[in-house]
Every structure is written in structure tokens, then in C-alpha cells.
Image (tube, rainbow, N blue to C red):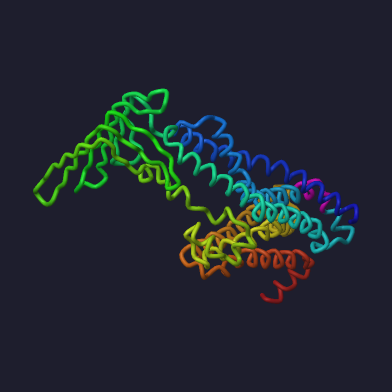
Amino acid sequence: MPRIDRYILSQLLTLFGFFALVLVSVYWINRAVSLFEQLISDGQTALVVLEFTALTLPLVISVVLPIAAFAASAYGTNRLSAESELVAMQAAGMSPWRLARPVLVFGVLVGLMVALLVHAVVPMARGRLADRQAEIAQNVTAQFLRAGAFQYPVPGVTLYIRDIAPDGRMMDFFLEDARDPGNEATYTATEALLVRTEAGPRLVMMQGMVQNLRQSGNRQSLAATRFSELTYDLGSLIDAGASRMRDLRAYGTLRLLDPDPELLAATGATPDRALAEAHERLAKPFQAPVAALLGFAMLLLGGFSRFGAWRQVVWAVLALIAVQFLATAAENQVAANAGRWPLIYVSPLAGAAICLGVLWLAARPRHLRRRAKGGAA
């Protein structure tokens, strides 16, 4: 690689590291705060919060890297222009196409980082996160089985335990399930035990009574049943079935391209939905070179101005917003109908077309552009 290319590439990589660090920190802190509130309220420790935020970090980085590439490219090009280095390169005969070569190399390097994340690191982290969420969902005691306080695990359910013995027995247990207004149930028991099974946690109540208040029209009836032992499924309270449902993002790309029945049963997804997720990963790395070239090419338009290149920067930001808008619109269409997954590639193709058009316009000598305008007039 020529020395001038290495110089431009080193400048872009340095700026990229700075912008990536700042943006990842902002995104990660925002995510960590929401996780902290959720997990701490469920009785989890700070180590669990740290583990969960660390497992969400690869996904955050994969989203932020293309934006950081755009910021580094735009800022670096503006600085090269302000210090007259870009002018000197152009005066030496380097065309916009030639100057774009190190920027393209920079964008490809960032794209390779994104590809490594979305195809390897993110699925691994999402799989581990799903396993940890399932483990915590099974830990009912840490969630809401607390002595001496009324708990509301889900809307319509009230739970109270007077005391929890050292061996795990819950003394003077009370549970009211009013989620169905037509059939409200109240459980009371002298003792209760939490039993873990393959189908999820079960609550075994001993020496108690269940009261069912049924309402049919204007009539109400109350039925009371005493029991010596009764089993209650806690899965409806902790949503264990949902926690065991795997996320498509926890599987590898090759497996998503050819989903097997086991994967579809574990995720509840359709073959088209799995295929759409795989193509979203395949298209995502292309956002990085497109963003880098957009930040570079737009700043080559226009001549020198003592007010700086703020107009070109605004146009570059607008172009990036347009490309991201196409990406969001395509994702919404695919979410509504997974069979439309080819729309995922519209955004990078449109961005590449904009970059080529801007570079072609920047490569035309200014006097030819004025002559073309004069001839048109």
C-alpha cells in the first residue's frame, strides 16, 4: 500500500477508535441503566447485572460501528481539507476515485469487524444470555418469594408469605389469582414448598384451603375446598415458557439459511423468518463501507469556503439518514412479511449508488460543470 494511503488509513482508524468508544459507551450505559432497574428490582446481584450488560455489548457494538465509521470518515476528510492536505493531494493529480481507495479499505476493515460480530460473537452472546435468563426465571425465590411483604408478580396476582424457614418452607402462605374476573381463586396454606421440575417450578401447598369466586351474569357463587396437599403451577407467574423460547439471534447464520425442524420448534419461527434473519446479518457488514464512503464523498463537493465545509457535512448526514431510513423501512416490511427479505439489500445498494454518483460528480472538473450548466441555459 502506498505511503499516502497508509497515512489516510491511519488517520481514519485513529478517529474511528475514538468515535466508536464514545458511541458504544453512550449506547451501553443507556442499556445498562434499564437492565439495572429491571434486575435489581427482581432481587439480582450487581454481578448478574454486569454479566447481562456485558452479554448485550456485542450487539450494541455491531450497531454502532457503521455510524462510527461515518463519523470518522467525515471528520477526517474535513480535517484533511482544513489543513490543506486534501488540496495538496488533488493538486498532485490524485482524483477523487484515487483518494477514495484508502477510505474504501477502511470501510471494508470495519465491515469485517461487523461481520465477525454478527456472525460469531453476537449469536454466542445471545445464546448465553438466553440460558442465563432461563436460569434466573427458574429462580423464583430471588424474584418474588420474599417474606413479610405483599408481592405482585403479574397483574391480578397477589402473594404473601409470613416467613421462610431455613430449610425453604414457606410459612402461612397466601395467593390470590384474580386474573380471570369470572373465576377468582384464593389459596391459603399453613406451609408451602417450591419444587423444581423439568416442566418448570411447582408450588406444593399443605394443609390449606382454596376458595373460588365464580360470577355468571348477576349471580355469584363461592366454593371452598380444603386440602392436605395441593400443587400449583408457577409457570404462569414467571412466564417460564416464554423464557425457554429461544431467540433466532442465538443461532449461527449457516443454520438459519437452512433451518431444521428442531430450530423452528425451539424458536417458534417460520422458515422465512429464519431466512430473513440470516440475510439481515449478511447485509449488515455492507453498511460500514457505504457509511465511510458517504462521509468522504460528500465533503469533496463544493469549493473552498472560509466558513468551512458545514454544507457538505449537512448533506452527508442527510444522505446517511436517507440510507438508514431505507434500511428501517425494509426491516419493517420484512417484519410484516418475512418473504420480502430481498428488500434488506436495497439500503446498501442505494447507498453505494449515491457514493458512486457523488464521486463521479466530484471527479468532473469544475469548469466542465459550469460549461454544462451554461449550455443547458
**Residue 302 appears in the rendering:** no
Q: Is residue 33 left or right of residue 229?
A: right
Residue 67 to residue 37: above or below? below
Task: Looking at the picture, tell me which residue is in the foreground, 214 or 36.
Answer: 214
Residue lying at the far front of the rendered structure: 228
Q: Is residue 23 magenta?
A: no
Q: Position of residue 186 (x, y in %)?
A: 23, 38
Residue 108 to residue 26: above or below? below
Q: Position of residue 319 (x, y in %)?
A: 62, 59
**Residue 243 appears in the rendering:** yes
Q: Main secondary structure of the magenta part?
A: helix
- Looking at the image, which residue is at 77% across and 43% down? 14
| Image quadrant where residue 146 sits | top left
Q: Is residue 316 left or right of residue 30?
A: right
Task: Looking at the picture, tell me which residue is in the foreground, 243 or 290.
Answer: 243
Residue 308 to residue 266: above or below? above
Q: Position of residue 245 (x, y in %)?
A: 48, 52
Task: Looking at the picture, tell me which residue is in the foreground, 81 or 273.
Answer: 273
Q: Position of residue 26 (x, y in %)?
A: 59, 39
Magenta-tinted stretch: 79-86
**How many labels sit on residues?**
0
Q: Quadrant of the C terminus?
A: bottom right
Task: Looking at the picture, tell me which residue is in the foreground, 164 or 257.
Answer: 164
Q: Is residue 85 magenta?
A: yes
Q: Quadrant of the N terminus?
A: bottom right
- Looking at the image, which residue is at 79% across and 59% down? 100
Q: Is residue 85 left or right of residue 184?
A: right
| Image quadrant where residue 189 sits | top left
Q: Is residue 346 left or right of residue 239?
A: right
Residue lying at the far left of the rendered structure: 218
